[in-house]
């Protein structure tokens, strides 16, 4: 994703985005890696959930979505992220828990985030562009 060092994000809470981060946030928004929230905010100081991170990574690496059925016990809680979760699970980028839940709204830890990122980089190298 190309970054224009002078770009300013189009989110409603641009003032709360640190100056050094504004071009990167603007690029991520412009290229559809992040969509922000329904109220137009980006929430730069907010925590990221498992489903949010997976969606950003799937969009950023252009890995797409899947319409495969999710078999997690809590699959009904995954609404907007369902396609990204299905594709991420298919590519083994992120998995569920031993109790057959995905827990998409749980905050993701740094350790989980880095393992997801590494698996996504591996998948991106092995997946032909669509």
Image (cartoon, rainbow, N blue to C red):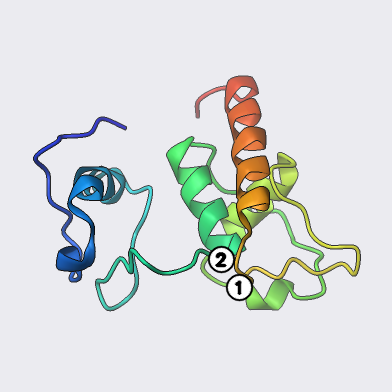
Which quarter of the picture shows residue 104? bottom right
Residue displayed at 53% across by 55% down: 53
Residue displayed at 64% across by 30% down: 123
Q: How many marks?
A: 2
Q: Position of residue 75 (x, y in %)?
A: 72, 71
Q: Position of residue 124 (x, y in %)?
A: 57, 28
Tag shown at residue 105: 1
Secondary element at tag 1: loop
Residue that lies at the very extreme toward the left in this rendered image: 6
Residue displayed at 52% across by 44% down: 58
In contact (CB < 8 Å): disc 2 and disc 1: yes
Q: Is residue 1 above or below residue 50?
A: above
Q: Residues within 10 Å of mark 2 (few under 14, many from 20)?
A: some
Q: Position of residue 113 (x, y in %)?
A: 61, 49
In front: 66, or 16? 16
Report whether 47 appears left or right of 99: left
Q: Residues within 10 Å of mark 1 (few under 14, many from 20)?
A: few
Q: Is residue 43 above or below residue 25?
A: below
**Which is nearer the N-term, disc 2 or disc 1?**
2
Residue that lies at the very extreme toward the right in this rendered image: 98
Q: Is residue 111 above or below residue 52?
A: above
Which quarter of the picture shows residue 3? top left
Q: Position of residue 45 (x, y in %)?
A: 37, 67
Secondary element at tag 2: loop
Residue displayed at 65% across by 27% down: 122
Spatial CA span between label 2 and label 1: 5 Å
- The residue under label 2 is 49
């Amino acid at each position: 994703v190309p970054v224009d060092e002078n770009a300013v994000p189009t989110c409603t809470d641009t003032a709360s985005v640190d100056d050094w981060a504004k071009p990167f946030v603007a690029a991520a928004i412009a290229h559809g890696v992040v969509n922000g929230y329904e109220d137009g905010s980006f929430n730069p100081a907010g925590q990221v959930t498992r489903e949010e991170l997976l969606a950003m990574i799937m969009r950023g690496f252009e890995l797409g979505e899947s319409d495969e059925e999710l078999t997690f016990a809590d699959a009904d809680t995954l609404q907007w992220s369902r396609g990204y979760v299905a594709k991420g699970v298919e590519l083994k980028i992120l998995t569920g828990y031993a109790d057959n839940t995905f827990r998409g709204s749980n905050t993701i830890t740094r350790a989980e985030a880095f393992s997801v990122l590494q698996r996504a980089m591996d998948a991106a190298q092995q997946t032909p562009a669509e």
